[in-house]
Image: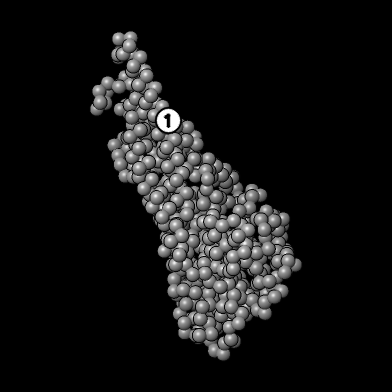
Amino acid sequence: MVPGDSISFHASTDVGRQREHNEDNYLIDKKLGLAIVADGMGGHAAGEVASAIAVRMLHNEVRRRAAFLAEYAKKGSAMRGGAREIHAMLASAVRQACQKIHEEGKADAERRGMGTTLSALLVVGSHGFVAHVGDSRIYMMRSGRIQQITEDHTVYNELVKRGRLTLEQIERVAQKNAITRAVGVYETVEVDTLTLDVLPGDTFLLASDGLHGYINHSAELEPYLEEADGDVAVRELTALANKKGGKDNITSLMVRLGAGDARDERRARRVEQKREVLANMPLFSKLAERELLRVIQVAEVHEFAAGDIVMREGDRGDQLFVVLEGLVHIIHGGQTLSEVAPGEHFGEMALIRSAPRSASAKAVEASELISIRRSDFFEILRSEQELAARLLWQFLGVLADRLDQTSRDLSSAKEELMAEDVTGEVFDEDAPTYTDAGGRRSLAEINARINARAAVEAIAAAAAAAVSASADVSPSSPKLAGARPVAVEVDDAPPTSSDSIDLASLGQDAQKAGTGVEDAVTPT
């Protein structure tokens, strides 16, 4: 929920050049900050009924939780668990719509198999929440850069991700454009959700495949998203799709955030800084932009005063820390082992195992740190298997590099001790030697042994997890092998003579193909 004057909505829908009627639906509720696009399938009246059910049921659930959303808009991230609850609300509403559509299809043979895509954006305070199923898309333009923030649930995209075929081979695959997830075709559906920071000047475009099917690269959208008049922009996008053939229904819905104040400018700098720091970390450097957004949504920012303890030796930790600003010392046995500067990280072992911290960390000066919790990291691994495999192999690489460095440190420490033995000065009173369970050792050796032990244990754990994740995305994986592609359109279904649901209760958006609901009151 955002102030009405700080966000604007612009929409256009068209039957196209080759369809007889429009099965797309969209909805705008300015007060709630909600925008939805749904592309129905099933032929004749079935597709528009499915898309109307999905749009209306999601809207009703968001409207029912308006008081909670208003509270989150005020408190933001300080409302612990609030974002997770919004995700759950959106996903649950989509699944309820899925069940309803499926039941209606079973009750009427002429509508059996009807379904719809659904892409929704809910702006609440300074955050945007996405719910997505199917092959409609949401694009975001920020600072002149356009990116697709949803993933197409299609046979084509699945083949690309697996990397088993060349693009030329995929182009020859029959039904490559069939969707692998839809709302209503089966009794339940997996819903993609995403949270992102929204900033003044951001522009979002929700588009059905009748539009984005003619866009070869997101950069082609730039002149339209930069058009000052949003109504003109969406009309021109419709004209573009029709000019290129108009083979399907065409819907575009643009959401624009207005100008902000000085606080928003500072927040924008911080959001970009957080993204750059995470993107440059070896663990996340290979991720695509959409995958990086998935990591950013679970990253929290903490402030520490000079002298504050970030983590304490011996405590069981569950967070990876990355220094955003300031300086942190890593301390063991009262001695400083290393300094961690902006862009550097520590505590990554806690992401994959629960064990006592091998050292303490203290802020030397006022510092801001990003943290990622083990539970959130595991949730990413569980929900996105391809991303999980990539993250875990990257993790192995990071730990292998650390082990290499540790081996070099141990060799250097050993050479120092041997040199001391040759001279007969085993322990000079002024030399930096300390005592641990193994007796008197040099600081370098203590540091190296700590790192070596932790790295070896973590590599073993990460290797097991990576192998497991790789197995989950193998061709024989039940999750993928059992997925049945959904035909995009069924134009030969016989006309329906009676409705099994009350179309009047859905409003004009169900009875008149392709209507959009502005503020959930006035159909366009």
Residue at the far right: name it: 243
The residue located at (51%, 81%) in the rendering is 112
Q: Position of residue 411 (x, y in %)?
A: 38, 24
Q: How many marks?
A: 1
Seen from this angle, which residue lies furthest top? 423
Q: Secondary structure at mark 1?
A: helix
Q: Is residue 202 above or below residue 26?
A: above
**Image point (51%, 67%), residue name:** 181
Q: State which quarter of the image contains the C terminus.
A: bottom right
Quickly name the residue at label 1: 405
Query: Can the viewer see residue 161?
Result: no
Q: Amino acid at mark 1?
A: Gln
> Residue drawn at (59%, 68%), measured in percent from left and top?
174
Task: Identify which residue, 422 or 442, lies in the foreground.
Answer: 422
* Percent coordinates x, y for residue 187 in the rendering: 44, 74
| Residue 49 position within the rendered picture, expressed as x and y whole percent measured from the top left | 55, 79
- Pick the front one: 104 or 202: 104
Res 474 → quadrant: bottom left
Which of the 4 image quarters holds residue 471?
A: bottom left
Q: Position of residue 354 (x, y in %)?
A: 31, 44
